[in-house]
């Protein structure tokens, strides 16, 4: 267990979504379809934390304020890397057809008001 949490616990705790490669949107995973890290092909999908694990570890005060936004998004491995690698928002949307802030939490998007301010089931 890394940083005091486990992927399986997070899969149980947070809403689950997947990136639809055909229409380039984030869609909910129906209940019961994913319950552990053993339920998907790791060569095809990565379980991506919308709010990066480093924020949880290094800034627990901020994480406590934004945890209601946390979700697990199943994404292609390259997308997972691109989202976390520092790739520009412009290049990300060009490569993946979706805004980067919808895949990974950014403070800039937060300050621009692009995320719901309260706990909401609204997709961003």
Image (cartoon, helix red, strand yellow):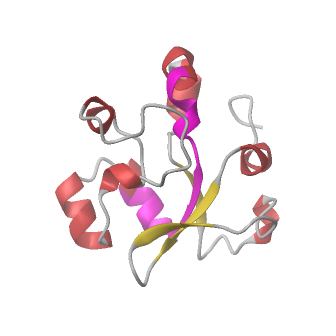
Is 89 located above or below residue 107 in the figure? below
Is 57 located above or below residue 77 in the figure? above
- State the image quarter where residue 31 is shown: bottom right
Quarter of the figure with the N terminus? top right
Query: Image check: 4 left or right of 109?
Result: right
- State the image quarter where residue 112 is shown: top left
Residue 75 included in the magenta stretch of the image: yes
Counting from the top left corner in percent of width and height, residue 35 is at: 81, 60
In the rendered structure, which segment of residues is drawn in magenta? Answer: 65-82
Residue extending farthest to the left is 90
Counting from the top left corner in percent of width and height, residue 52 is at: 50, 39
- State the image quarter where residue 60 is shown: top right
Counting from the top left corner in percent of width and height, residue 25 is at: 42, 70
Residue beneath the point at 42% across and 48% down? 104
Residue beneath the point at 71% across and 36% down? 2
Residue beneath the point at 74% across and 35% down? 5
Q: Nearer the viewer, residue 49 or 33?
A: 33
Residue 121 included in the magenta stretch of the image: no
Q: Nearer the viewer, residue 34 or 119?
A: 119
Residue extending farthest to the bottom is 22
Mainly helix, strand or loop, the magenta region? helix
Counting from the top left corner in percent of width and height, residue 107 is at: 32, 32
Query: Image check: 86 left or right of 18?
Result: left
Residue beneath the point at 25% across and 64% down? 93
């Amino acid at each position: 267990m890394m940083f005091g949490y486990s992927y399986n616990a997070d899969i149980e705790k947070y809403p689950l979504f997947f990136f639809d490669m055909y229409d380039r949107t984030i869609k909910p995973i129906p209940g019961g379809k994913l319950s552990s890290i053993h339920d998907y092909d790791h060569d095809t999908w990565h379980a991506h934390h919308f709010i990066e694990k480093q924020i949880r570890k290094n800034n627990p005060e901020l994480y406590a304020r934004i945890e209601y936004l946390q979700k697990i998004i199943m994404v292609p491995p390259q997308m997972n890397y691109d989202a976390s690698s520092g790739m520009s928002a412009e290049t990300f949307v060009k490569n993946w057809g979706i805004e980067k802030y919808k895949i990974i939490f950014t403070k800039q998007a937060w300050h621009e008001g692009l995320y719901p301010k309260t706990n909401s089931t609204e997709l961003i």
